[in-house]
Amino acid sequence: MGGESGVSDRVWTLPNVLSMLRLALVPVFLVLVVQGAYIPALVVLVVASLTDLLDGYLARRLGQVTRLGQLLDPAADRLYIFAALLGLAANDLVPWWIVIVIIARDVFLLVLGVVLANHGYGPLPVHQLGKAATFALFSGVPIIMLGLAFPVVQPVSEPFGWAVTIWGAFLYWWAGVIYAIETARVVRETRVSGPPASDTLEPGG
């Protein structure tokens, strides 16, 4: 155990097990969405969200913040967003362009990560705008699904869910542009001053 700011390299901690459970439920969630079983899918999503809150609380409470946990948490959030969008698009309930927009942004960040790695840096620290974008997407898509599960609320939930989702997609790319600008700055400074003394370890948001 060790590392900066009390972050350890442990794998088998209770928070990490909860994160792994949340990841294991992603294919279950996707199948339910594709099958149009929106109520069970929302139940899975609620369970996943609760485990997300719980593992974050336990990690801080028990002093079990780990590098693996820092990777698993944002990965799980993204996978649930992708699964929901893919399932809804497969049922012709959302346009494929929104799926492409969201996935393209993460591919863009992956490219930035490769550029940083080639210059001796780890991924850039999480930006608050990236967190806000992920939160908006993670909220907007389930709100759309809520209307599909309960048609009585659809006249309200569908336009609201779409508004939040599109705003989240905009913020998602805005954060991506900020990461690109920061990557260019880091690369430029590296060319001037040489390799970095240390790198960052947090995943991009």
Image (cartoon, rainbow, N blue to C red):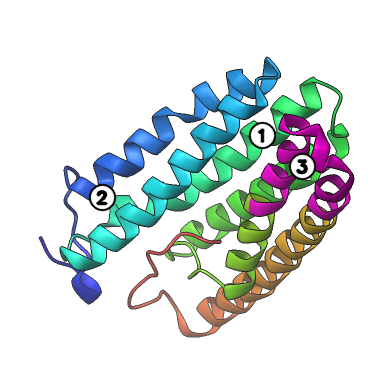
Q: Which residue is painted at 70% across and 25% down in the image?
A: 87
* Local crowd size for mark 1, using a 10 Å CA cut-off: few (<14), some (14–19), many (≥20): many
Residue 129 percent coordinates (x, y): 64, 72
Residue 92 percent coordinates (x, y): 86, 24
Distance (Cα) linking label 1 and label 2? 24 Å
Specify the amino acid type for callout 2: Pro
Q: Which residue is mark 1?
A: 84
Q: Where on the picture, by quarter, is residue 121? A: bottom left
Residue 35 forms part of the magenta stretch: no
Instruction: For the N terminus, give its image quadrant.
Output: bottom left
Element under label 3?
Answer: helix
Residue 153 forms part of the magenta stretch: yes
Q: Which residue is painted at 85% across and 57% down in the image?
A: 163
* Local crowd size for mark 3, using a 10 Å CA cut-off: few (<14), some (14–19), many (≥20): many
Element under label 2?
Answer: helix
Disc nearest the viewer among 3 and 2: 3
Residue 38 percent coordinates (x, y): 66, 27
- Span of residues in magenta: 139-162
Q: Which residue is mark 2?
A: 15
Element under label 1?
Answer: helix
Is the residue under label 1 in contact with that under label 3 (CB below 8 Å)? Answer: no
Instruction: For the C terminus, give its image quadrant.
Output: bottom right
Is the residue under label 2 in contact with that under label 1 (CB below 8 Å)? Answer: no
First-in-chain label (3 vs 2): 2
Specify the amino acid type for callout 3: Ile
Is the residue under label 2 in contact with that under label 3 (CB below 8 Å)? Answer: no
In the rendering, which numbered label is found on residue 144?
3
